[in-house]
Structures are given as C-alpha cells and as structure tokens.
Amino acid sequence: MPKMKTHRGAAKRFEITGSGRIRRRKGYGSHLLVKKSSRRKRTYRVKQEVSPHDASKVRKLLRRG
C-alpha cells in the first residue's frame, strides 16, 4: 500500500501550531473591502482556531504517510 498523500488544498489553508492546534484564516476578508470598517478588516488578519469538531477532520487531511 502506498503512502497517504497530504491534501494540498487543506495544506494551503490550515497550519498546525507547535502545541498541535490547527489555525485557519477567516472568510470574507479578501474583496469588497471598501464598505467594511477598519475594525472589521483588522480582525481578518488574526488567525482563528479550528473548532474541535472540525479539527479531527482537518487533521486527517493534513496527515502525512
């Protein structure tokens, strides 16, 4: 059986921290920025932790063989 490949789409969207938590970018922060407030746009810069329910699914996509 060959090794499992990392899901490349997931690898570009998520990162695993040193403590093992998974972080992601927030949505809606890449276009139509004129009508969004500065405060709202600032929050898009901060990465958010993936919910525990979804973390197991994402971890499966990011696994390395």
Image (spheres, rainbow, N blue to C red):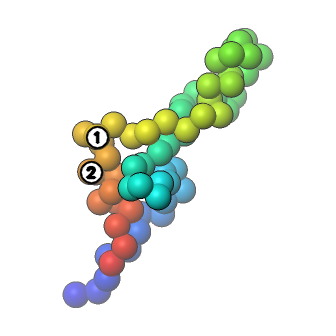
Above or below residue 52? Residue 64 is below
Q: Are marks 2 and 1 in contact (CB under 8 Å)?
A: yes
Q: Is residue 37 left or right of residue 60?
A: right
User: In the shown orientation, is residue 12 left or right of residue 21?
Assistant: right
Vertical order, 43 against 45 (above or below): above
Q: Is residue 31 left or right of residue 9?
A: right
Pinpoint residue 5: horizontal percent, then vertical percent. 38, 74
Mark 2, residue position? 56
Q: Quadrant of the N terminus?
A: bottom left
35 or 58: nearer the viewer: 58
Q: Residue at x 33, y 57 (%)?
A: 59
User: Where's residue 30, x and y in %?
Assistant: 67, 32
Q: Residue at x 33, y 37 (%)?
A: 51
State which quarter of the image contains the C terminus: bottom left
| Residue type (three-letter) at the residue carrying disc 2 | Ser
Give the spatial CA distance, label 2 vs label 1. Answer: 7 Å
User: Does dot 1 land on a helix, a strand or a loop?
Assistant: helix
Depicted 15 relative to depicted 31: above or below: below
Q: Residue at x 49, y 43 (%)?
A: 24
Q: Quadrant of residue 10?
A: bottom left
> Residue 28: image x %, image y %?
58, 27
Element at label 2? helix
- Taking the view exactly as shown, the residue that stands out farthest to the bottom is 1
Q: Position of residue 55 (x, y in %)?
A: 32, 47
Which residue is more in the foreground, 2 or 50? 50
In the rendered structure, find residue 52 and report the number of the disc placed on it: 1
Name which residue type carries label 1: Pro
* Residue 11 against residue 40 in the figure, above or below: below
